[in-house]
Image: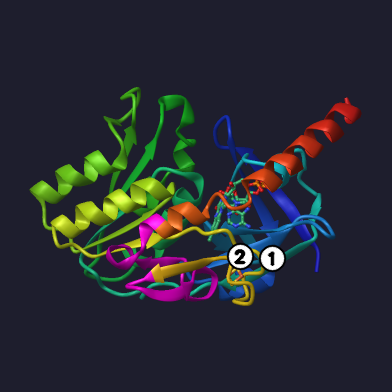
Amino acid sequence: MKHTITRKEVLNGADYLIDVVAPEVAKRFVPGNFCMMITVPNGERIPMSIQKTEGDIISLYFKKLGKTSYELDTWKVGDEIYKIIGPMGSPPPIKKYGTVVFASDLVCGHAENWAMCDILRKIPGNHIISIQSFPTAADVYPDKELCESVADEFILATEDGSRGVKGHYLDVLQKLLEERKIDQVFAGGAIPPLQKISELTKKYNVPVYTTVRQIMVDATGMCGSCRVFIDGEQKLACIDGPMFDGHKVDWESAISRLTMFKTKEAVAMDCLNEKMKGVK
Ligand SMILES: Cc1cc2nc3c(=O)[nH]c(=O)nc-3n(C[C@H](O)[C@H](O)[C@H](O)COP(=O)(O)OP(=O)(O)OC[C@H]3O[C@@H](n4cnc5c(N)ncnc54)[C@H](O)[C@@H]3O)c2cc1C
Ligand code: FES
């Protein structure tokens, strides 16, 4: 199977999107699933959220963080990704919830939110409010890549107030919870705010699904790298998640586990920098 890149666009200074041929993933994808990607033979496996599918094509949003994401940013339309595996994970129920808020402040969450908003909005009785937050106006994605077209109400927030509402999604949600009846919240993106949104929604007695991104090595349930504790019980984010009831997540343990490969990631990035210098 050739996983050819069919589109590549800049989203902001650090984030970019690619469309890539992946029929087996596209055919079976349900919002809440993710895929595993290996860009080159013997390359690392990296988990990726899927923003949308169209025919055989899946759309992915990337942040330039380390070796693989920087390297992939040098690729062009027509280049081929070695392997894309999936869909993986256990999506939350796709059903009538009532008034649903989707919130994110980071690339993976913006992608997930899009897919979830799009499917839940088609279910009668759901009213979808999307809050997407970015640090500044310069970081905001192009209009057509924001969740506006897949939500009933769309709130853009920037932390410095340079575009949209001033503040983080947590500030916007707090106001909504004070003013309106919200039946369900979904949140993705950076992990520390997900702990805060879990505390906030608990205060208002509103259920929340949070995406607990953990380091995934195999994503087949064999290595245990992605374990999370839900109500004291061990679960695997790659099999049972990655979306979990935020009120039940052991956030201290989930956050502490994220740094376990930092030294190796830094070494890989140094090697890439050396390689790139050689190319110039
Ligand atoms: C379910 C899930 C969905 C994700 N969706 C997206 C997405 O839509 N867009 C996106 O840009 N990123 C997403 N990520 C994170 C993504 O996998 C990492 O950004 C990517 O692996 C970075 O690799 P790198 O070599 O560029 O950077 P590295 O230097 O290897 O890593 C940089 C940081 O990325 C994270 N990371 C690295 N490897 C993994 C891994 N195997 N599993 C999980 N996190 C890792 C860690 O926080 C790490 O510190 C997702 C992660 C998970 C678990
Ligand atoms: S990534 Fe290995 S068990 Fe989930």
Residue range corresponding to the magenta coloring: 230-252
- State yes or no: residue 31 in magenta: no
Residue situated in front as seen by the camera: 122 or 264: 264
In magenta stretch: residue 245: yes
What secondary structure is found at the residue carrying circle 2? strand
Report whether residue 152 is seen: no
The residue under the point 38% across, 55% down is 252
Residue 53, percent across and down?
Answer: 56, 62
Amino acid type at mark 1: Ala
Q: Residue at x 33, y 37 (%)?
A: 156
Q: Quadrant of the C terminus?
A: top right
Location of residue 22 in the rendering, given as x and y in whole percent from the top left corner: 69, 65
Q: Residues within 10 Å of mark 1 (few under 14, many from 20)?
A: many
- In this rendering, the answer to whether 98 lies above or below 257 is below
Q: Is residue 125 left or right of residue 140?
A: left
The reply to whether dot 1 and dot 2 touch (C-beta < 8 Å) is yes
Pointer 1: what residue? 22
Q: Residues within 10 Å of mark 2 (few under 14, many from 20)?
A: many
Tag 2 residue: 35
**In the displayed structure, does residue 235 sit left or right of residue 209?**
right
**Residue at horizontal 11%, vertical 57%?**
181
The x, y position of residue 192, in whole percent, is: 38, 47
Q: How many marks?
A: 2
Q: Nearer the viewer, mark 1 or mark 2?
A: 2
